[in-house]
Image (cartoon, rainbow, N blue to C red):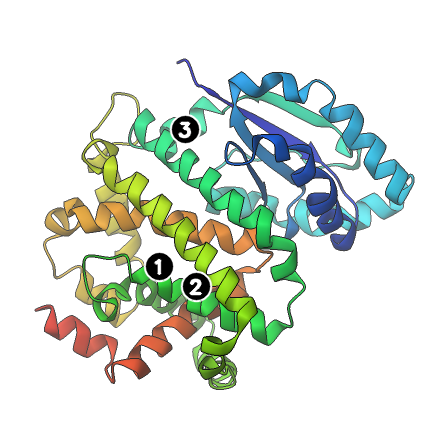
Amino acid sequence: MNIEFLEVKAFFFGTEEQKRKTYFSFILPFFKEIDGEFSAERDWNGGPHYRIILPKHHDQLLVHFEKDFKAYVKREFGDLSKVELEENIEQYVKHHETIAGMESRSKEEINAGRHLTVAIHSYDEAYLRQTFNSYQHFVVHTQSLFFMQKFISSFGERFFNLPKEKKYLYFTKMLYEVLTFSSFHPKFAVLVYVSNIEGVFAIAEQYGKRAAFEKAYQTLYKSLPFETLANDPEFNELGATWKDTIGNIYSLIKENVKNLFTDEEGFYSKELQKEELVQNIQGISSEFHDLLLKQDVEEWTNHEEHVIYRVLINIVYKSAHMLQFTFTEKNFACYAVCEYVMDKYHTTWREIMAQRGINA
């Protein structure tokens, strides 16, 4: 297959602070000249490497990347000892197989010897085929990430340096703005986030921790001063750019929606996706997901709105860890936006489901 994109993995096993500084002070500036045509991710909790995707026609930009990358790290942080490296990668050695499974990526070998190594190759075809319905689906996803990267490059560092309360407040409102692009009212569109948080609570329930999670989330949610956003110039600037970014991604997806999930031989077929979706939902012990399965699965998974938001929300969730949120923090933001909508429209997700004709 002629894949038009390159994947760069740059391994750096410094401290979290060092990795963050390198991302904002070296990685993003290095690719600035192709802003809008690359994405640079760090995996959840900082990840063991930076992962950059860019079109192959920009390959000349990479000629000095490895040399400059090593020079920057050594200049800023010196030579890290083997003991320091092994301490810094301990959590990834322990959890990387689980994270790779959650991300549906090939498992990376992580050891101190890979520190400051760089791998440059064509985008992983096996991952592409097992993740996307067609090559066109992959291209739209990748171009959507490029749009999101422009936002991260402009606001990521500033966002990270906000007080925690403001970060949660801003991101909750940003998640709400995503709903305003739906053909459905935000009151109905919010179910996409309800699905996420009810799944999280179902897992917490298995460990006897749901009540503790809900109490902590509710306390934090109640502390967020949403009324201050209207007169917050910092959020007005960030929020306007976010809305433009989501609008660009939404338009791109909508323009291509008819071709996004047209099965292409050798890719992740719609039938297999549907089967795995049903299996996953059946494996979630939650009232919300039980109600979902009472619908015509074929009908709602093929609905244009579902197709658009499936791609869009995937990008939005990626933006959470690009903005340095942890899994738990991203899940809180999903909870907070659900509560925000329920409070705003004086309803519950059960009432919303009933209004859509889905009853217990």
The numbered mark at residue 174 is: 2
Q: In terms of image quadrants, where is residue 281?
A: bottom left
Would residue 28 be found to the left or right of residue 311 on screen? right
- Image quadrant where one finds the C terminus: bottom left
Judged from the image, the secondary structure of the residue bearing numbered disc 1 is: helix
Report if the CB atoms under discs 2 and 1 are less than 8 Å apart. Answer: yes
State the residue in front, 353 or 295. 353
> Which residue is found at the position 77% from the left and 32% from the top?
69
> Measured from the top left, where is residue 229 in percent x and y?
48, 76
Q: In terms of image quadrants, where is residue 42?
A: top right
> Measured from the top left, where is residue 309 in percent x and y?
28, 51
Report if the CB atoms under discs 3 and 2 are less than 8 Å apart. Answer: no
> Which residue is found at the position 51% from the left and 31% from the top?
37
Residue, far top: 2
Q: Which residue is mark 3?
A: 128
Q: Amino acid at mark 1?
A: Val
| 186 is higher (above) or lower (below) than 305 | below
> Measured from the top left, where is residue 266 in percent x and y?
30, 21
> Which residue is found at the position 60% from the left and 56% from the top?
324
Would residue 74 be found to the left or right of residue 309 on screen? right
State the residue in front, 213 or 336. 336
Q: Name which of mark 1 and mark 3 comes first in the sequence.
A: 3
Q: Amino acid at mark 2?
A: Met
Q: Which residue is mark 1?
A: 178
Q: Amino acid at mark 3?
A: Leu
